Amino acid sequence: MDRWEQQGLRSANSGIRNQVEHILDAYEEQRAQLSEVQTRLAAARSTAKSADGLVEVTVDTAGVLTEVRFAPEAMRSNPDTLGRSVTEAGREAARRAHEQAQTILAPIAEAAAAMPELADLVPGAPSLRDPLPDDELPASGKS
């Protein structure tokens, strides 16, 4: 191997090392953010009222019902109306919770999308993003 080939290999090796260091730095940053994100997700709640004002529902970021409140006049409504009001408020609260969770998770998703692909570093390696459905990738990660 001549001097030029050795220099080329050293240069390529240096480039790969820089990319790996970048990935490790990004990983450490994400790891530090993850604890905060988990805390925020656990504490977040979304509330919605039914259009008729009979019911107010609160859910966590997973859409799990955590509280239901009825207006005093709700006790005078029929069961079908009350059921529809609970369902309407629950769906709206769950929709808001999903949006809230996406907002909380956005910084981590953006950082992950900015990281180089494994295939960029190791020729022939599989993409780590391919198994994810498009709706789970941040907008910048979609093709």
Image (cartoon, rainbow, N blue to C red):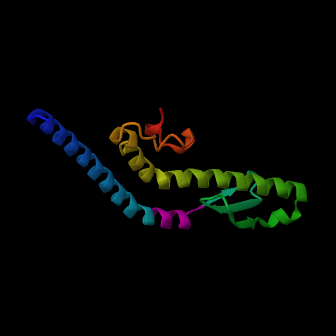
Residue 43 lies in the magenta stretch = yes
The x and y percentages for residue 19 are 28, 46
> In the rendered image of this protein, does residue 120 appear above or below residue 96?
above
The residue at 48%/54% (across/down) is 105
**Can residue 50 be seen at all in this image of the molecule?**
no
The stretch of residues the image draws in magenta is 37-45
Residue lying at the far front in this picture: please name it: 1
Residue 44 lies in the magenta stretch = yes
Tell me: 83 left or right of 10: right
Tell me: 139 left or right of 69: left
Q: Who is closer to the viewer here, 111 or 54?
A: 111
Tell me: 97 left or right of 89: left
> In the rendered image of this protein, does residue 61 appear above or below residue 122?
below
Q: Who is closer to the viewer here, 82 or 17?
A: 17
Report which quarter residue 15 is drawn in: top left
The x and y percentages for residue 128 are 46, 44
Report which quarter residue 124 is drawn in: top left
Tell me: 6 left or right of 24: left
The residue at 84%/58% (across/down) is 82
Which of the image's four quarters has the N terminus? top left
The x and y percentages for residue 7 are 12, 38
The residue at 29%/50% (across/down) is 20
The x and y percentages for residue 110 are 41, 47
